Image (cartoon, helix red, strand yellow):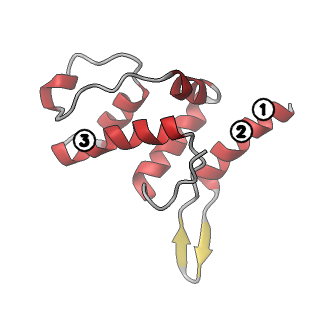
Amino acid sequence: MEELIKIFEPKFNGIYGWTTNGHEAVPPIHDFPIEVKERVDYFADLADDGLTFLGILDYIFSEEKTEDYDFGASKPWLPMTEGFKEWVNCLHSLAQMEVAVYLLYGRSESVAVE
């Protein structure tokens, strides 16, 4: 049980750990392993090429390159690492939710990398 809490808590805080600074909402800090941050940032940059938010999420969580990837991508496919798979496969839906929060509310200043 303690091991599950150790895995659950950072993801939960990365989704629901909002704070305030005066009258401003402050997004949560994301405690990502370096492999997770690198993969998410890699595919997030494709938004500059016109990739949609859902398209970015799809690529981040796809283990294999999709058939349509080469159609509009400006950089090569990034294979999924074992470290990323391990992070995602434990509490998969929370991992997806945390990545979505990270993409929507701040990528650079909100990460404490392990």
Q: Mark 3 or mark 1, which has the lower sequence index?
A: 1
Q: Name the residue under label 1.
A: 4
Asked if marks 2 and 1 touch (Cβ < 8 Å), the reply is: yes
Cα separation, mark 2 vs mark 3, equals 29 Å
The quadrant of the picture occupied by the N terminus is top right
Compared across the picture, whether 66 is left or right of 29 comes to: left
Report the quarter where the C terminus lies. top right
Q: Identify the amino acid type marked 1.
A: Leu
Disc 2 packing (10 Å; few <14; some 14–19; many ≥20): some
**Within the image, what quadrant is residue 22 found in?**
bottom right
- Choose between 7 and 78: the one closer to the eye: 78
Compute the Cα span from label 3 to label 1.
33 Å
Gap between marks 2 and 1 measured at Cα: 6 Å
Q: Which residue is labeled 2 in the image?
A: 8
Q: Which amino acid does label 2 sit on?
A: Phe
Closer to the camera, 86 or 104? 86
Residue 23 screen position, x and y as percent:
55, 82
Disc number at residue 46? Answer: 3
Residue plotted at (43% across, 58% down): 108
What is the three-letter code of the residue carrying label 3?
Answer: Leu
Rendered residue at 33%/27% (across/down) = 78
Q: In this view, does 105 lie to the left or right of 44?
A: right
Tag 1: Cα neighbours inside 10 Å, few (<14), some, or many (≥20)?
few
Q: Earlier in the sequence, mark 2 or mark 3?
A: 2
From the viewer's perspective, tell me whether residue 65 is left or right of residue 80: left
Whole-percent x and y of residue 27?
Answer: 53, 62
Instruction: Kindly identify the residue that appears in the image at 21 percent across and 33 percent down.
Output: 75
Q: What element carries label 1?
A: helix
Give above or below for 23 relative to 106. Answer: below
98 in relation to 60, above or below: below
Image quarter of residue 92 = top right
Q: Is residue 23 above or below residue 81?
A: below
